[in-house]
Image: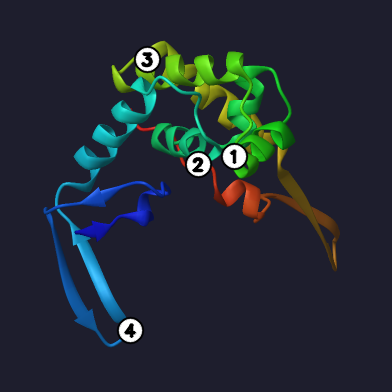
Amino acid sequence: MYHYTECGLDNVWLANGYTTKTTAYGKAVSVADADQLQALLAERVVSKPARLSGKEFRFLRVQMGISQATLAKTQGVSEQAVSLWERHGKVPKANDALMRLCYLAHAQGDEPLREAFNRVMEVERLIHQKIVATAGPKGWKSTVEEEPTERLAERPAVAT
């Protein structure tokens, strides 16, 4: 059995459906149809009776392809609150329930939900731009660039 920690959860073991290979960098593991496996794990997480752990909360957020900032805005909390929940696992009941509902709608292909998340992420992207001013022989010129921050690197587009 393989302890599948790469998904971000500590309690997942694979009985089969994976192959291991020794490389120059150590052992490498390949999981068959990883997307289907991730969806199955998300279904299990969403349907569990107990409150979500921080790792489970993060797992669902990542499965939806949204950033902490986007999730925070859509749940009416600060980005720091989402970060704390994910690190320490104390997710308030209302936010736990809202996350489960958001994931279920996302998994069923709810286009209005995906569009709403994409709009929030686009606004975040536009807010976090930097203006680069350059002095030249004919005066100043400026360009606008996205800030290469770790926060922005975590923000993948929501799959449609």
Q: Residue at x 24, y 33 (%)?
A: 40
Mark 1: secondary structure: helix
Q: Earlier in the sequence, mark 3 or mark 1?
A: 1
Q: Earlier in the sequence, mark 2 or mark 3?
A: 2
Q: Is residue 37 left or right of residue 113?
A: left
Whether label 2 touches label 3, CB < 8 Å: no
At label 4, the amino acid type is: Tyr
Residue on which the image places disc 1:
86
Q: Nearer the viewer, residue 10 or 22?
A: 10
Q: CA distance from mark 2 to mark 4?
A: 28 Å
At label 2, the amino acid type is: Lys
- Residue 48: give x, y in percent of width and height: 37, 23
- Residue 119: give x, y in percent of width and height: 55, 23
Residue on which the image places disc 2:
55
Circle 2 crowding by C-alpha within 10 Å: few under 14, some 14–19, many from 20: some
Numbered circles on residues, count: 4
